[in-house]
Amino acid sequence: MPKSNFFLCLMLLISLGLSESDEPSLPQPQDLPVPPRREGSTAADGLLVDAEEPAAQECPACMWREHSKVLRLETIKSQILSKLRLKQAPNISREVANQLLPKAPPLQQLLDHQDFQGDASLQEDLMEEDEYHATTETVITMASEPEPLVQVEGKPSCCFFKFNPKIMFTKVLKAQLWVYLRPLQKTSTVYLQILRLKPVTEEGSRHIRIRSLKIELNSRAGHWQSIDFKHVLQNWFKQPHTNWGIDINAFDEGGNDLAVTSLGPGEEGLQPFLEVKVMETSKRSRRNLGLDCDEHSLESRCCRYPLTVDFEAFGWDWIIAPKRYKANYCSGQCEYMFMQKYPHTHLVQHANPRGSAGPCCTPTKMSPINMLYFNDKQQIIHGKIPGMVVDRCGCS
């Protein structure tokens, strides 16, 4: 890539995510500090983590990466101030921040439950938001006959619940077991029991009671009874081999079992069922639409490189969390010989070869970070800052 195109790309990166007003000035590429060429050092010592590079003279692309890295850091600082609508960083030292931080449960809960992207896992790095496929919210599973291993002379004939393996990896928000109770002629106390089934041994059946309810019932038209089943279901999802099914009975004062578990005439559609509300992740495996490289890579094409931003190294003690986060940056060449990797850009360039200065290596997908910080009035604010993490790089 010609050197002029490279600097053009660097300047293009500056404008990403910045508004046209209220943003601090950024250094021009020619004003950026040239990194000292000593072994083990980086262009922004103290600001980066795990970002050692080979000597620039051994790797022509390394100098470009150094410039991209320093510019990315300056851009991040400017973006944060601009997106938080701050003219300058609040003048809050670490000592003042510690004095102002309340030791109160709401703040601790916020720190415990919010994902501040400070230590994102590798699994998260390999996932992206799935904006196409439907997500599961409610699953209704009808009861079926359990395995013969848990039956004695064909009893009990109910109830086993089979689940899709996909659902077993979701978060269970609510689970209700629904049982239909036959109508009564008069008001009666009903004792409902739920027993966990286990394989029959030489000692006989091993049914373990897991729930029991006392119900005052006066329904002459039948009654659907719901039972909280979340804890049992969570255990089944964690240990699927323990799911042999359950036995349900509901005896009235006369010893009659009112629970419909085996369907008689006119009882179609009255078998027990589970209603499960789940929260399914809307992420899927990331498609390989961009190159990922490490700092020791000799790849010259447009690539995403790791970059960890350390706010404490900036002296930004006004940021409560995260103290550091993985921002990443883009660097590399976008020569026409590599356009088979980026066919859309290639078609555009081919259609209008004179109307463009050439493609630049820039972020093509970015994601936000959560941030807890002091504003310039020393108030604690929790918010989400968009476009702070480079998820994918490409030529455009």
Image (cartoon, rainbow, N blue to C red):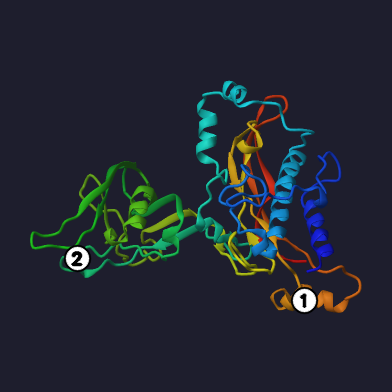
- Secondary element under disc 1, as helix, strand or loop, is helix
Q: Residues within 10 Å of mark 1 (few under 14, many from 20)?
A: some
Closer to the chain start, of discs 1 and 2, is 2
Question: In the figure, 364 relative to 76: above or below?
Answer: below
Looking at the rendered structure, the kind of residue marked 1 is Tyr
Q: Residues within 10 Å of mark 2 (few under 14, many from 20)?
A: some
> How far across and down, in percent of the image, does residue 38 sit?
62, 51
Q: Residue at x 55, y 30 (%)?
A: 107
> How far across and down, in percent of the image, does residue 125 sit?
55, 57
Q: Quadrant where the C terminus lies?
A: bottom right
Kindly identify which residue carries mark 1.
336
Q: Residue furthest left?
A: 203
The disc placed on residue 284 is: none
- Left or right of residue 359, residue 118 in this image: left
Looking at the rendered structure, the kind of residue marked 2 is Gln
Q: Quadrant where the N terminus lies?
A: bottom right
Question: In the figure, 324 relative to 327: above or below?
Answer: above
Q: Residue at x 81, y 57 (%)?
A: 12
Kindly identify which residue carries mark 2.
151
> How far across and down, in percent of the image, does residue 223 sit?
39, 50
- Secondary element under disc 2, as helix, strand or loop, is loop
Residue 393 in sight here = no
Question: In the figure, 369 relative to 361: above or below?
Answer: above
Residue 82 in sight here = yes
Judging depth in this view, the residue of 201 and 106 nearest the camera is 106
Mark 1 vs mark 2: in front: 1
Judging depth in this view, the residue of 143 and 74 nearest the camera is 74
Question: In the figure, 330 relative to 94: above or below?
Answer: below
